[in-house]
Image (tube, grey):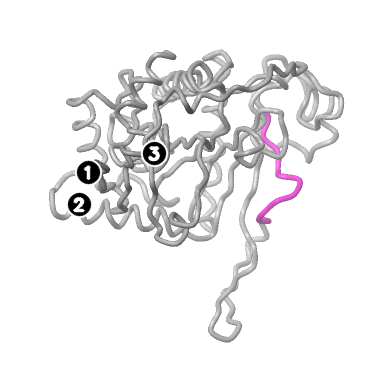
Amino acid sequence: MSEIRRDIVSDNWVIIATERAQRPESFTLERPVKKIAAREHSCPFCYGNENKTPPEVFAIRSTPSGSNEPGWEVRVIPNKFPALENKQKLDLEKSGIYEFMSGEGVHEVIIETPEHHLSPGSLSLEQVKKIIDSYYIRYTELEEDTFLQYIQIFRNHGKEAGASLEHPHSQLLALPLLPPSVKKEMAEAREFYFQEKECVYCRMLEEEGVRGERILVHNNDYLAFIPYAARLPFEVWILPRRHQSSFSEMREEERYGLAEVLQKVLSMFINTLGDPPYNFYLHSSPTGLKYLPDYHWHFEIIPKLTTVAGFEMGAGMFINISNPEASAEFLRRGH
């Protein structure tokens, strides 16, 4: 019989359609072998093509090379076609009953490696750590800007997940407002804290640790697991064990732990699901709000293995045709 499970964080309900559930193996993609060169002459993100991008705002370099030259290991640039532009002027206006504001903010691209053919799931742990370092450094620098209220880090892997360029990269969008989904998530976490006098995410870490059946990988600093009310097949959350409401509260040694867990989860996707398209994104407290007792930053990873259709869009609920416990057991085989 199907179950309707409540997501304790968002207060959303998810149908776990066990009668329609497919075996985890059925989600593995049979992709034709595609040989991708380590460098592509026409790719603006590859070594030697630095002049094809806007000037970098940050880079990690292994050699004492100059800005906007080869020698970088991770490179951060303004998005050439930004969704938002930083002009430091925000006016809320009305058009009849509707409201709008100018598209102000910051939109950056994090080029994760000079290697055109790799991704975080196949990169070395040391390189993934440099990516996390870049996230952290740009996040902490941008949160000092009082004009910006929220910083969204995200990654689209594969064309089906929205990646417009093949070269491995992630993005950062800094917004002058708090996204509604995060606002709702924070409100639910605040209500749980008011009722239970503890952080809902810390409680979730405790519960998942005791049960163990949905855990994928863990270390001293992080736990990666498939949520009890996963919205889609093989959805994964990564939470820090130490209570932290803001991504910028992360310590130096915890960045290495995050890189380790993230790299292992994404390599599991490669080894068991055939490197599916996916999105991952950060949820954190708004800029200027640190050390909140009721919220907990985390990453969510969503493989694109099914289609969000009419019911999901109409009802605002999800139907998951993959059992979370069976999905976790399957992914652990790829560890």
Task: From the image, tell me which residue sits under label 2.
Answer: 192
The structure residue drawn at horizontal position 72% and vertical position 19%, both measured from the top left corner, is 34
How packed is label 3: few (under 14 Cα within 10 Å), some, or many (20 or more)?
Answer: many
Q: Above or below — where is 126 with respect to 318? A: above
Q: CA distance from mark 2 to mark 1?
A: 7 Å
Quadrant in the picture for residue 265: top left
Quadrant in the picture for the N terminus: top left
Total numbered labels placed on residues in the image: 3
Q: Nearer the viewer, residue 99 or 225?
A: 225
Q: CA distance from mark 3 to mark 2?
A: 29 Å
The structure residue drawn at horizontal position 33% and vertical position 18%, both measured from the top left corner, is 219
3 or 2: tag closer to the N-terminus: 2
Q: Position of residue 150 (x, y in %)?
A: 49, 52
Task: From the image, tell me which residue sits under label 3.
Answer: 321
Residue type at mark 1?
Cys
Q: Secondary structure at mark 3?
A: loop
Q: Are marks 2 and 1 in contact (CB under 8 Å)?
A: yes
Q: CA distance from mark 3 to mark 1?
A: 30 Å
Q: Secondary structure at mark 1?
A: loop
Looking at the image, is mark 3 or mark 2 nearer the viewer? 3
The structure residue drawn at horizontal position 76% and vertical position 45%, both measured from the top left corner, is 80
Asked whether 297 falls inside the magenta stretch, the response is no
How packed is label 1: few (under 14 Cα within 10 Å), some, or many (20 or more)?
Answer: many
Is 258 left or right of 2, judged from the image as shown?
Answer: right
Q: Secondary structure at mark 2?
A: helix
Q: Which residues are magenta?
A: 75-85
Residue type at mark 2?
Phe
Is 96 left or right of 287, judged from the image as shown?
Answer: right
2 or 1: tag closer to the N-terminus: 2
